[in-house]
């Protein structure tokens, strides 16, 4: 990413966009927009590989898109995209290229193709061998962050492609309550552990890996080399651990973009090599769309522009994600890391403090569960929160009638957010109340929905490896787009480091030993909490 490219607020387009906001944007009403424009849905619906997106229920129109697209041009977005995809240093604070797209390119079509496909072929051959090994019934992936969220999300999403006799588990939390209950259910002789750590030094991962190895030995296990594999670049450290089967990746693969690499080994075991290649192919198709489609039809770019419009002009600080497919239950958590770790930054590439917000708070639950939890706030709360509905046309199950009910709920919620219900409509309804004397006009106010609340609806024909790959790549490129406009580095995560360093210093004061309970050099609050946890006296 070129740090000399103008930041969004340094452009004439930003000033023009601010004028458009003052004149039209802040008072935008979706119901009026649909009444005025019979072609609104057609103009604001977009097809990308494996994904259809209806943006018509958002607080935008063709004029807004014009100003946003001009902003993208003035920020030299196409040039910066092409530089990143071409291998230029796009992570300047760490001096690295950003080439997770190379992991998805067909053989001979991407950068580092020989290295990528040599590793991929070896990893997939091993995955298929494990998948067909009747002696292995349980696979436990031990990782955290990008080494857990992506694979765990994908395996659950693609459960219909897994084998009935094999189970894939994920352990990430250093809390022993994550690992211990799982170990209690496993047979050491029939379990494979995958230690997923790029450096083989990640604190939480190595603590869990050492605990798993100790359990394995206690259960009579002797062949660590057969029952443990690693996805890491630190082959020597893995060998010292007792692991001889390792699959590596490169420094241009960021953790939250790594499920396409050897980190995807548990996905490949779960769904098989052919389906893993389909996952990569779907992502590559979206990569080509991002690289080649004109900006006005480029879905990742349009979504990134919409994010800037919402966060910096409307002040919408969070975004709800509502996947209407239980297989996507872990998608909101995956997107939290992808977006909030990427764009949760306070300075630009030049080190200047940012005068505007970046990155929404991303959160959600599968529909219809979310409807009975937080949708009350979405419909009648004081904050306006854009919602993204993810609908899948064809289910992976054969239970009669249920999928139609699910889709009806998804469609109805986006419709209700937009239309709302007026006080007059609420007053006209016959609603029994516990207190027959309750003032009907007041009751009508409680039953009024303001409406005009924005949402986006995505439609996938089916949840397949290919469509999942395309959908995840769509979000990756969307995050980069908004980050590029804000002038930030979307690929470092220094905010993770400080807490880790402090935890390392505090650990000896919590463990048995001469430093236990010591509070010297600590702030008063931390000292008091440490004393409470260790039982030490001041």
Image: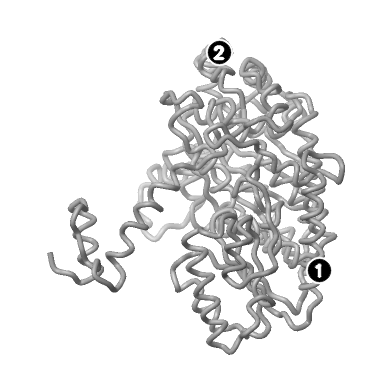
Q: Is residue 198 above or below residue 184?
A: above
Q: Is residue 466 above or below residue 359?
A: below
- Residue extending furthest toward the bottom: 220
**Picture coordinates of residue 188 (x, y %)?**
62, 84
Sort mark 1 into few (<14), some (14-19) or many (20+) by Cα contacts within 10 Å: some
Residue 18 in view of the camera: yes
**Picture coordinates of residue 68 (x, y %)?**
63, 20
Q: Element under label 1?
A: helix
Q: Quadrant of the N terminus?
A: top right
**Residue 310: quadrant of the picture:** top right
**Residue 503: quadrant of the picture:** bottom left
The label nearer to you, 1 versus 2, is 1
- Residue extending furthest toward the left: 538
Horizontal side of residue 450 vs 419, given as left or right: left
- Residue extending furthest toward the right: 108
**Residue corresponding to mark 1:** 128
Q: Nearer the viewer, residue 128 or 338?
A: 128
Residue at 64% of width from left, 68% of height from top? 194
**Picture coordinates of residue 397 (x, y %)?**
77, 67
Residue at 20% of width from left, 52% of height from top? 521
**Residue 63: quadrant of the picture:** top right
For marks 1 and 2, the one nearer the N-term is 2
Sort mark 2 into few (<14), some (14-19) or many (20+) by Cα contacts within 10 Å: some
Residue 366 in view of the camera: no
Residue 11: which disc? 2
Q: Quadrant of the C terminus?
A: bottom left
Horizontal side of residue 315 vs 472, given as left or right: left
Q: Is residue 342 above or below residue 115?
A: above
**Picture coordinates of residue 464 (x, y %)?**
79, 56
Q: Is residue 374 above or below residue 358?
A: below
Residue at 82% of width from left, 58% of height from top? 121
Give the CA separation, mark 1 to mark 2: 52 Å
């Amino acid at each position: 990413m070129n740090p000399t490219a103008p930041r969004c607020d340094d452009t004439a387009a930003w000033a023009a966009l601010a004028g458009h906001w003052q004149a039209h944007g802040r008072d935008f009403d979706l119901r009026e927009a649909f009444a005025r424009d019979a072609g609104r849905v057609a103009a604001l619906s977009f097809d990308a590989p494996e994904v259809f997106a209806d943006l018509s229920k958002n607080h935008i129109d063709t004029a807004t898109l014009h100003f946003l697209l001009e902003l993208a041009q003035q920020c030299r977005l196409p040039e910066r995209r092409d530089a990143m995809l071409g291998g230029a240093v796009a992570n300047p604070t760490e001096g690295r290229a950003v080439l997770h797209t190379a992991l998805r390119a067909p053989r001979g079509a991407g950068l580092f193709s020989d290295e990528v496909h040599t590793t991929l072929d070896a990893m997939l051959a091993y995955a298929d061998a494990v998948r067909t090994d009747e002696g292995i019934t349980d696979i436990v992936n031990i990782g955290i962050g990008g080494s857990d969220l992506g694979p765990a999300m994908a395996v659950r999403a693609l459960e219909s492609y897994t084998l009935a006799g094999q189970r894939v588990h994920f352990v990430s939390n250093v809390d022993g309550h994550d690992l211990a209950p799982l170990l209690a259910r496993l047979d050491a002789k029939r379990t494979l552990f995958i230690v997923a750590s790029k450096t083989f030094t990640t604190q939480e991962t190595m603590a869990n890996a050492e605990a798993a190895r100790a359990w394995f030995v206690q259960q009579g296990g002797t062949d660590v080399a057969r029952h443990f594999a690693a996805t890491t670049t630190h082959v020597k450290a893995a060998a010292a651990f007792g692991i001889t089967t390792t699959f590596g990746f490169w420094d241009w693969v960021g953790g939250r973009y790594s499920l396409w690499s050897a980190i995807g080994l548990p996905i490949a075991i779960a769904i098989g090599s052919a389906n893993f290649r389909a996952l990569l192919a779907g992502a590559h198709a979206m990569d080509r769309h991002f690289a080649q489609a004109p900006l006005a039809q480029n879905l990742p770019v349009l979504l990134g522009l919409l994010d800037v419009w919402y966060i910096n002009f409307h002040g919408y600080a969070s975004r709800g994600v509502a996947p209407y497919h239980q297989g996507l239950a872990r998608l909101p958590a995956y997107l939290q890391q992808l977006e909030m770790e990427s764009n949760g930054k306070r300075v630009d590439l030049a080190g200047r403090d940012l005068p505007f917000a970046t990155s929404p708070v991303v959160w959600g639950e599968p529909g219809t569960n979310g409807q009975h939890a937080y949708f009350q706030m979405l419909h009648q709360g004081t904050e306006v929160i854009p919602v993204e509905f993810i609908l899948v046309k064809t289910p992976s199950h054969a239970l009669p009638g249920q999928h139609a009910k699910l889709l009806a709920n998804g469609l109805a919620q986006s419709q209700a957010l937009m239309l709302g219900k007026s006080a007059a409509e609420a007053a006209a309804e016959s609603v029994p109340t516990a207190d027959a004397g309750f003032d009907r006009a007041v009751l009508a106010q409680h039953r009024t929905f303001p409406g005009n609340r924005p949402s986006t609806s995505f439609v996938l024909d089916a949840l397949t490896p290919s469509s999942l790959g395309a959908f995840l790549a769509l979000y990756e490129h969307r995050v980069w787009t908004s980050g590029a406009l804000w002038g930030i580095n979307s690929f470092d995560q220094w905010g993770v480091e400080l807490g880790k360093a402090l935890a390392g210093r505090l650990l000896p004061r919590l463990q048995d030993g001469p430093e236990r309970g010591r509070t010297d050099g600590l702030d008063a609050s931390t000292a008091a909490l440490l004393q409470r946890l260790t039982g030490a006296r001041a």
